[in-house]
Amino acid sequence: MKTIIVTGAVSLLIALFGTPLAIRVLRSRGYGQPIRVEGPKSHEVKRGTPTMGGAIIVIASLVGYLVGHAATSDPMTTSGVLVLGLMTGLGVVGFVDDFIKIFRQTNLGLRSGAKLAGQAVVGAVFALEVLQHPDGYDITPADPHLSFLRDFGPAIGTLPFVVWIVILIAGFSNGVNLTDGMDGLATGATVEVLAAYVLIGIWEERNDCTIGLTQVCYQIRDPLDLAVVASAVLGACVGFLWWNAPPAKIFMGDTGSLALGGVLAGLAVCTKTQLLLLILGGLFVITTASVIIQVGVFKATKVRTGHGIRVFKMSPLHNHFDLMGWAETTIVIRFWLISALCIGLGLGIFYAAWLQT
């Protein structure tokens, strides 16, 4: 528990005091955010705001994790390192995307195929690695199973498991990326999901099968260190949110959104709550669904009638409400509340299932 607190505090302080320095450096180099031409006109005032701030979140998380373990003499674990490695790898993919946008001064970075390929490579390496590295109880960071509150059903095999985890990672990294369209929106929602994973990690540790074999125990490798990872990233996000809250002084960019989506997926895989993440991260799922619905309906109706029908004024969903005249802070706070409701539902299911087991 001490490691969780120290790690979160160190990450928070690094992000809180490191972000202003990053803002000055990025401004001096002219690394400003390009704005979509077809986007809401209210976003034009944000043009030139420093971006790639997600690098601060990644660095603060890594340093906080290292310092937290060093300060408490608590050994780092394979599960924790793998999840942070996934976050870092996706952060690198996002950094390349952001840098291309800045270099070209356009909102188009990596081609979608190249971006997806980068996510797939990083995700596949993670998926293969979590099936290795058994501990003294022969428990690996993950098993080739689907999971909701714990693993269920028969093993699906290595290849299907890797494909499924790549889809999960790509889906959530892109989901956070799509949600990151308003000041503080994605960062705040991610903080809420990470807080849930701190609680899940602690709960699984207290009911670990290696401590006491009961009908309600969890067979998870390193659950407490996964809570430490969640705390590290949570602290970094809170420190960054101080400067990213409306009106934002800096944006996380794809560097941050891909990294944060990756760490959420990684925590879900290693805590064996893959499908529960669809509820806990409900805001990201809703946002992604709004884009899929918008594009799907538009293309289908265009083929049939010659002109496409738009379900929303603009996708992702937060842009729809922006064009309806809602204030940005109103949208952000209400979407945070929706995220909190999804998390409350997810944690309620998690706890209720434990009581009924």
Image: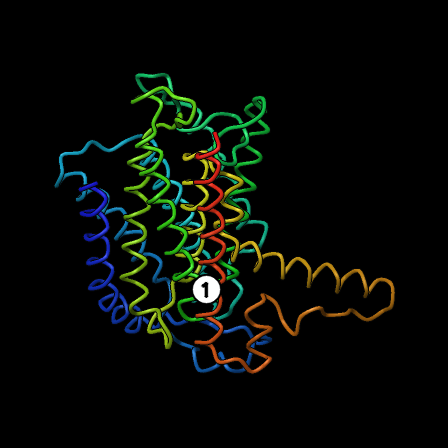
Query: How far from the left and from the top, in percent, is residue 112?
Result: 58, 54
Which quadrant holds residue 296? bottom right
Can you identify the residue that label 1 sits on? 337
The answer to whether one can see residue 320 in this image is yes
Residue 52, percent from left and from top: 37, 62
Spot the residue most to the right. Answer: 305
Picture residue at 39% right of the left edge, 61% below the top:
187
Q: Quadrant of the N terminus?
A: top left
**Location of residue 71 (image quadrant):** top left
Q: Is residue 332 left or right of residue 22?
A: right
Q: Is residue 255 visible?
A: no
Instruction: State left or right for residue 275 relative to residue 139.
Output: right
Q: Residue at x 48, y 57 (%)?
A: 341
Residue at (58% x, 58% y) in the render:
286
| Circle 1 crowding by C-alpha within 10 Å: few under 14, some 14–19, many from 20 | some
* Residue 86 to residue 33: above or below: above
Q: Estimate the x, y position of residue 50 in percent, counting from the top left.
A: 35, 70
**Three-letter amino acid code at disc 1?**
Leu
Q: Position of residue 98 (x, y in %)?
A: 43, 61
